Structures are given as C-alpha cells and as structure tokens.
Image (cartoon, helix red, strand yellow):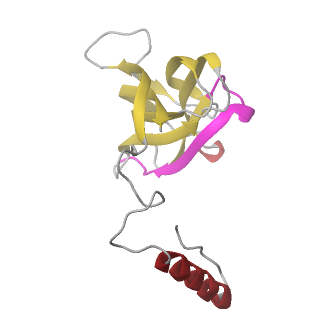
Amino acid sequence: MLSKYYYYKSDQRTAMNDYAANHKKHDKREHCKKHDKKGKKNPSSKLVEFAYQTFDPIIPTTLPLNFPLSTQPQVIAAATLKNVERGNVVWLNGLYHVNNNSPEFADLITRIYRGNISPANLIYQSIVEVDAEGNNDAMESVTQFVDVIPADGQETTYFLTAQKGQFSADLNVFAYGPFTFTAAEIKQED
C-alpha cells in the first residue's frame, strides 16, 4: 500500500500512521497474497505500429528542401497510423532545420496537429527564438511529444508544421532538410 500525500501536516502524519499500522499487520518473514509478487507480470508496453516520413537532401523529392517560412502553418512532414485504438499512446518525434537570414531574431513556431490542420486539432506547440544572421542563426528544431489516442479510428494522421511568429512576418526565415517525422503507436499491456 502506498502512503497518501497530503498538503496539511496533521493529515500527513495521520496518513503515515495509517500506513505504519497496515504494514505491521503482515509479518515480513511470511508471504501473504497481498504481498506475493510471484506469478504477477509487470506491466509492459508493446509497439503496435510505426509510421514515418523522411526527406534527405541527397535524394530528390517533390518537397523543396530549402523553402521560406510564412506566418501560416506549413507542413514539414506527415505520418499516418492505421487502425489506432483508444487509450494507446503515440510517441511523436520531429526534426527539421531552420536558418534566419535577417538582421534581427525571429520567432519559430513548431506545431503538431492530429487529424487535420485546425486550432481544434492542435496537440503540441513550441516557440523558440532564432538568432539574427551572423549569430546562431542556423539551428535544428527537435520535437518530442506523447499523444493519448482519444478514440478508435481507421486512420489517424499527424502533421508536423513550421511557421514564423506574427512579428517575424517580414524576416527571411527558411526551413531546410533533412526532415524526419515519426509516429509510434504503443499499447500498454497488463
């Protein structure tokens, strides 16, 4: 039995005393069903499905590998999982690069959307500053997030997007490869 955590000191002492009283009921040398861990499996996880999209600058693709960012979300990559199950988790990882060719810093917004690109489907967002030209103006954007699947579905697509902040609209900020976006559905097993 785990002890309870309380914010008030007197309640915490009561919870600790309750735990001590329950612990004394069982002799440490003898096993009882409550404390016998033999035959019980520890919970584990199982990879159900893995989807990814990558663009390597060595291989020609239809997506330009160096393109200017706007103040609207631009899809860097997408990954689709099939037959997802409610309650499973999806481990999302994204990587792309950015370069600011402007004399002042720029805001870079990275987002992940589930299903389609709309504010209601936004599940992750990060905002970072990219230094001005001549400083640390070229960098990589790394994203990691875990999404809990809200409902069963035939297909669930995740979109990795990039954009400049609204106050960086006039700045020359570019995204470039290599791009990587992965989605791994994981089921908790009992």
Q: Is residue 115 magenta?
A: yes
Q: Which residues are magenta?
A: 114-133
Residue situated furthest left in the rendering: 58
The residue under the point 46% across, 32% down is 186
The residue under the point 64% across, 18% down is 153
The residue under the point 40% across, 46% down is 40
Looking at the picture, how far across and down is residue 112, in whole percent? 57, 34
Residue placed most toward the observer, 43 or 171: 43
Q: Residue 99: in sight, yes or no?
A: no
From the viewer's perspective, is residue 9 above or below residue 113? below
Residue placed most toward the observer, 186 or 95: 186
Residue situated furthest right in the rendering: 120
Looking at the picture, how far across and down is residue 2, in whole percent? 52, 68
From the viewer's perspective, is residue 30 above or below residue 23? above
Residue situated furthest bottom in the rendering: 10
The image quarter in which residue 32 lies:
bottom left
Looking at the picture, how far across and down is residue 88, in whole percent? 55, 32
Looking at the picture, how far across and down is residue 72, in whole percent? 64, 31
Q: How many marks?
A: 0
Q: Is residue 119 magenta?
A: yes
Decide if residue 162 is on the left or right side of residue 97. right
Residue placed most toward the observer, 135 or 117: 117
The residue under the point 63% across, 35% down is 71
Q: Residue 108: in sight, yes or no?
A: yes
